[in-house]
Image (cartoon, grey):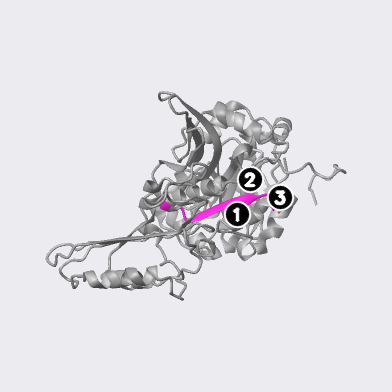
């Protein structure tokens, strides 16, 4: 189940996020201290140069990203189109943004971003790959670079919400669903019990 | 918004028992005020509100019906009424304060004294059968959440007053926070990182206890007893982290209040997607607050590739 399979004992309990009062927080501090995969050490399946040779430029940050073109990718994968102004605000308050630009057309073909508190936790949102460019490793390239950037800052608690049909995409990248029974929950007004 | 609290609102006809927790009404009353803009909606809601199932209300409950109306056909016509029902057992508080602004376009709303008298006496008779759901309240109609307010006030037998203050301003001492994390048994995190995490959080909600002894001439003890924070991109998503309540104050609904107010603050800032990750034993706690686990099969995943 875990990628770095030299560990025969079960992986240590999930560090982070104890939302119940009184419950032990886990080994977050120890994990952060022993993290050896931060920054440049994080492996990339396809290098920046290789992507470049295939016609894709790796872009970091929102500069140069045309928001309506990003919206076009969102719509193409079935996400709702969003108000570009709100996207602009969101990106201003997003810690890490990685996207791949097709050199020929100068359009974004893959995108992902991560928000968080900058020290402990981060959540990856809005990972999209234009359907015409899926299946060639671009999504993986985006995630790996996001992880590299976050781990480089020492953030060891990285999470995301995955639609059921792409659980298989995230698993080989090292993501585990519901570890230790931790459940992702979303607030829904209509479900609120009064 | 309907409040169910573990407290009793003191009324004019009974003095609050000193060992009971009393709610400070002012802020909560104002929170419950709903701005109504249409006369017909007012009328229908008032009429439905006034037929209530009073079976749950015990003999010591207090009902006061306070109606104000001004009938001024030419300008604005305001109708405010508040109904407060307090029952011994479930302490169900219903507050309705509709405000009507009627312009010349609407028929002015004139209430006859006799009409209200008859309704009032009908209520007192305790003979109604219909259970009424409180009218649905649009979040947008609610008063904005004040940044800081008294959540609970308790008077102890010796006269000491303890107030629990909620604040969404994020002004909490990082040393206090570390002490609180120690108290609940969380491993130590570096102070500088704690400070940075708070600074980078979109909203930091806190609960402080302020205790004033009688005759202490203004000396008060202030302690941090709870915290919850949310990170956000300020536009679409927010995630709640680190919800904690001092063990000495747990079991009183403070954690619930903390999270509820945090959610409300986020909703008022127009954040549509509020998320969190819950340990298995608190999934139910958050479900009761309106969270859904794995909506549409969407799963929370964590990166173990560290």
Q: Is residue B296 above or below residue B194?
A: below
Mark 3 and mark 1 residues within 8 Å of each other at the beta carbon: no
Q: Which mark is residue A19?
A: 2
Residue A91 or A110: which is nearer the viewer?
A: A91
- Which badge, 2 or 3, comes first in the chain's sequence? 2
Asked if residue B273 lies in the magenta stretch, the reply is: yes
Q: Whole-percent x and y of residue A101? A: 53, 51
Q: Secondary structure at mark 3?
A: helix
Q: Is residue B236 visible?
A: yes
- The residue where tag 3 is placed is A173
Q: Is residue A63 visible?
A: no
- The residue where tag 1 is placed is B286
Q: Taking B89 as reference, is A143 left or right?
A: right
Check if mark 3 and mark 1 are on a common chain: no
Q: Nearer the viewer, mark 2 or mark 3?
A: 2
- The quadrant of the rendering that contains the C terminus of chain B is top right
Mark 2 and mark 3 residues within 8 Å of each other at the beta carbon: no
Q: Whole-percent x and y of residue B98? A: 31, 62
Q: Which class describes the residues within 10 Å of circle 3: few (<14), some (14-19), or many (20+)?
A: some
Measure the C-alpha gap from mark 3 to mark 1: 29 Å
Asked if residue A173 lies in the magenta stretch, the reply is: no
Looking at this view, name the residue that lies furthest to the right. Answer: A8
Measure the C-alpha gap from mark 1 to mark 2: 10 Å
Q: Determine the chain carrying the residue at label 1.
A: B
Residue visible at 59% across and 47% down? Answer: A123
- Highlighted magenta segment, given as a residue range: B268-280
Measure the C-alpha gap from mark 2 to mark 3: 26 Å
Q: Determine the chain carrying the residue at label 3.
A: A
């Amino acid at each position: 189940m875990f990628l770095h399979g030299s560990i025969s004992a079960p992986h240590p309990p999930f560090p982070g996020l104890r939302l119940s009062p009184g419950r032990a927080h886990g080994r977050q501090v120890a994990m952060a201290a022993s993290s050896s995969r931060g920054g440049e050490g994080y492996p990339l399946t396809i290098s920046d140069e290789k992507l470049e040779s295939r016609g894709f430029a790796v872009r970091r940050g929102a500069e140069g990203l045309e928001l309506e073109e990003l919206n076009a990718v969102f719509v193409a994968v079935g996400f709702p189109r969003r108000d570009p102004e709100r996207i602009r605000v969101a990106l201003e308050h997003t810690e890490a943004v990685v996207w791949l630009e097709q050199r020929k057309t100068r359009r974004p073909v893959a995108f992902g971003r991560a928000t968080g508190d900058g020290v402990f936790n981060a959540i990856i949102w809005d990972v999209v790959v234009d359907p015409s460019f899926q299946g060639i490793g671009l999504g993986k390239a985006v995630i790996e670079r996001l992880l590299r950037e976050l781990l480089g800052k020492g953030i060891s608690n990285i999470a995301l919400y995955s639609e059921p049909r792409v659980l298989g995409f995230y698993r080989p990248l090292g993501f585990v669903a519901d570890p230790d029974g931790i459940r992702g929950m979303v607030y829904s007004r209509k479900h609120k019990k009064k | 918004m309907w409040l169910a609290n573990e407290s009793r609102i003191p009324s004019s006809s009974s003095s609050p028992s000193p060992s009971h927790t009393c709610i400070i009404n002012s802020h909560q009353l104002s929170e419950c005020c709903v701005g109504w803009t249409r006369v017909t909606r007012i009328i229908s809601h008032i009429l439905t509100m006034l037929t209530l199932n009073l079976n749950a209300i015990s003999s010591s409950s207090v009902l006061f019906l306070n109606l104000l109306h001004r009938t001024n056909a030419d300008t604005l016509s305001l109708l405010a009424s508040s109904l407060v029902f307090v029952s011994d057992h479930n302490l169900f508080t219903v507050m309705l304060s509709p405000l009507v602004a009627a312009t010349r376009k609407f028929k002015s709303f004139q209430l006859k004294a006799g009409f209200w008298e008859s309704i009032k006496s009908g209520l007192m008779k305790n003979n109604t059968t219909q259970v009424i759901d409180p009218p649905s309240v649009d979040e947008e109609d609610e008063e904005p959440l004040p940044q800081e307010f008294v959540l609970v006030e308790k008077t102890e037998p010796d006269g000491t007053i303890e107030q629990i203050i909620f604040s969404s301003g994020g002004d909490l001492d990082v040393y206090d926070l570390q002490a609180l994390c120690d108290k609940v048994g969380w491993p130590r995190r570096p102070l500088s990182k704690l400070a940075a995490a708070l600074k980078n959080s979109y909203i930091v909600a806190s609960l402080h206890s302020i205790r004033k002894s009688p005759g202490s001439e203004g000396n008060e003890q202030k302690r941090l007893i709870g915290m919850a924070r949310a990170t956000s991109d300020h536009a679409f998503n927010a995630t709640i982290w680190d919800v904690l309540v001092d063990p000495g104050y747990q079991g009183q609904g403070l954690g619930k209040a903390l999270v509820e107010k945090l959610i409300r603050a986020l909703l008022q800032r127009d954040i549509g997607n509020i998320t969190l990750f819950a340990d298995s034993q608190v999934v139910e706690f958050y479900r009761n607050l309106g969270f859904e686990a794995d909506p549409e099969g969407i799963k929370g995943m964590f990166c173990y590739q560290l």
